[in-house]
Amino acid sequence: MSFAFLAGFQLSLGLIAAIGAQNAFVLRQGLRREHVLAVCLFCAVSDAVLISAGVAGFGTLSRALPAAGEALRWGGVAFLLWYGARAFRAAWRGGEALHAAEAGAARLPGVLAALALITWANPHVWLDTVVLIGSVSARYPGQSASFGAGAALASFVFFFALGYGARLLAPLFARPRAWQVLDAAVGVIMWTIALRLALG
């Protein structure tokens, strides 16, 4: 295992570990035990595609076009503010709890459509995978593919651990208050990331 592979794995895992829109969605699906395999696979493959694009040179291209980077940044701020407000609204309204009888209630096409929006329309995901990982991969000439492979593997490991590990928290999330705390925490995290993006 090369140093570049391990560096890519470590960087990607560090970027993904903070609860973001994608992670919150995967956690929610894992808690509900709804379409967990499809959701985890969708997130991991999407990350792998975006990481590959960044390693292939799109990260360098975005640095050459600062206007594109700025558009991504402010689009990310707007998206994260909206998603945070949505989470705060859910926390305020409350009333949600995990019930085993509801498992499988959501249809897969609807779940994947929502996940596609959260993943592909979220500029923060693009900034992390394409721009940041793509840029850092340039520091490993001749080993950028190994760096990208490590980064992509980290996504697979993280999302499957999150999706299938969430069921260990199911007893806690049987209480509506726990969902309110989770939604409020997601809102805080989304707005914090938005502030960091806005401040550069």
Image (cartoon, rainbow, N blue to C red):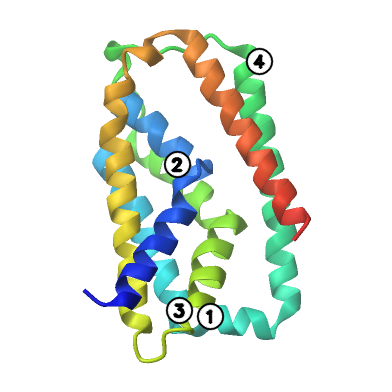
- Judged left or right of residue 175, residue 124 is right
Instruction: Tell me the CA gap for discs 4 and 1.
Output: 40 Å
Give coordinates of residue 166: x percent, y percent: 32, 29
- CB atoms at circles 2 and 3 under 8 Å apart? no
Q: Earlier in the sequence, mark 1 or mark 2?
A: 2
For image coordinates 53% across by 9% down, the residue present is 95
Instruction: Tell me the CA gap for discs 4 and 3.
Output: 42 Å
Q: Amino acid at mark 3?
A: Ser
Q: Amino acid at mark 4?
A: Trp
- Is the residue marked by circle 1 packed among few (<14), some (14-19), or many (20+) residues within 10 Å? some
Q: Earlier in the sequence, mark 4 or mark 2?
A: 2
Q: Amino acid at mark 2?
A: Asn
Label annotation for residue 23: 2
Q: Is residue 27 above or below residue 196?
A: above
Q: Earlier in the sequence, mark 1 or mark 3?
A: 1
Q: Earlier in the sequence, mark 4 or mark 1?
A: 1
Give coordinates of residue 99: x percent, y percent: 33, 11
Outermost residue to the front: 3
Instruction: Tell me the CA gap for discs 2 and 3.
Output: 24 Å
114 or 171: nearer the viewer: 171
For image coordinates 57% across by 84% down, the residue present is 60
Question: Which quadrant of the rendered structure holds the N terminus?
Answer: bottom left
Label 4: state its secondary structure: helix
85 or 8: nearer the viewer: 8
Label 3: state its secondary structure: helix
Label annotation for residue 58: 1
Label annotation for residue 92: 4
| Residue topped by disc 3 | 137
- Is the residue marked by circle 3 packed among few (<14), some (14-19), or many (20+) residues within 10 Å? many
Q: Earlier in the sequence, mark 2 or mark 3?
A: 2
